[in-house]
Amino acid sequence: MLTPVTRAGIAAAAVACFVLGALVLAPAADATSSSSGATQAPAGEVVVVAGTAESVAARATAAVAAMSLSERAASVIMGHISTTDPGVLRDYMSSTGVGGFILMGANIPGSEDRLREITAALTVDPAVPPLLGIDQEGGDVSRLPWDDFPSSITLKNEPPEATELAFAGRGALVQRAGISVNFGVVADITDDTSMFIYRRALGTTPESGASHVAAAVVGEEPEALSTLKHFPGHGAAPGDSHRGIPSTTETYDQWRQTDAVPFAAGIDAGAPLLMFGHLAYTSIDEKPATLSSEWHRIAREELGFDGVAITDDLGMLEASGLREYQDPVANAVAALAAGNDMLLSVLGTNSQTAAELTAGIVAAIESGALPAERLDEAAVRVMTLRLQTAGAGRGLVPCSSCAPAA
């Protein structure tokens, strides 16, 4: 179990349990410079080379351009099936071609070693790894039973430094498991203890939320890809979005001064993913933010977010019971059209769901209902993040038998 003493100590302990995995140069006889200016390694050594942001983006664009329409559609889906069988999971990833997979409780075995077997099976091509996600907030929402780090339940009442240390440890646990994306940073704020989201929120005020959210993002970097949720903010919208579409009449100006503040802080801190919630701010858009092009515009143009926009579980829309959200394929197409780059699907899914969503996206493109450019944009953003996880700094592969780090 990692003990949060200092950030440097946690990082050193985490790195000690990993072996370098991707983008290595072959050993050369001497350390020399090639005609291209790249330094080659001396005999017996390897060098891990991180690609520039421009080179990764160019590779992502080229990779997406080489895909068929169906492959592009599948690449923006984060799927799920409930099993811990590595063979079944590998077959699922190979047959569907989905760009990501979320590990829920039904995918988590009793040990890290077994979990690494599962994440290895999900990673069919290590050079282009899928985005493997997990809801590891700690506390009430914790998939890893060995995570004993403090959660928002107590962190909201402690200095931001405690949040940074807790999430540094939490990010290391996620990485040790072979998982790249943590849906763990709850940027919602509320001081109402009766609210559904209260215990999970990192702050009770805009200021405390901002400082703790930014600290959590900094803490997880670079061990895990942080995701801010649930944009534009669950604290202003009473109710449980697993059972309905919580709504609020809060205006844009009110939002900008309150619920927006922690999200802006997390974006400024470098969070690479933003999860859109099934929340309706009716004075801005009657639609839930997941399906709102206006909320996606606000996130990108007003807050400056340039990463991967991902939906909350689309199955929750069906679970709302509202008639207009009972078609999972229509929900997926509408979410993609609104500006989401990745479509998360959990509730009600089975081994055929990903293929059905893929076919629905393809049909929408072919009919003109969904612009091909929107799918391409989403696929490139997702592919860029996938390639980044394979590069230096995030290309740390769990060793076969990591001893607990102290």
Image (cartoon, grey):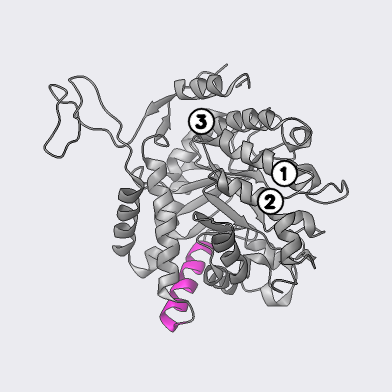
The residue that disc 3 covers is 176
The residue that disc 1 covers is 209
Q: In the shown orientation, is residue 348 left or right of residue 204?
A: left
Q: Which marked residue is nearer to the observer: mark 1 or mark 3?
A: 1
- Which comes before the other along the chain, label 2 or label 3? 3
Residue at point 52%, 68% (across, down): 336
Residue at point 45%, 70% (across, down): 374
Amino acid at circle 1? Gly
Give the secondary structure at mark 1: helix
Q: Note whether 231 is above or below 252 in the view shown.
A: above
Q: Residue 39: where, in percent of width, then height?
A: 20, 30
Q: Which residues are magenta?
A: 352-368
Q: In the shown orientation, is residue 61 left or right of residue 259?
A: left
> Is residue 380 shown in magenta?
no
Q: Residue 217: where, in percent of width, then height?
A: 58, 40
Residue at point 55%, 46% (across, down): 271
The reply to whether dot 2 and dot 1 touch (C-beta < 8 Å) is yes
Query: Residue 261, labelled with which disc?
Result: 2
Amino acid at circle 2? Val
> Is residue 364 shown in magenta?
yes
Q: Residue 263: where, in percent of width, then height?
A: 64, 51
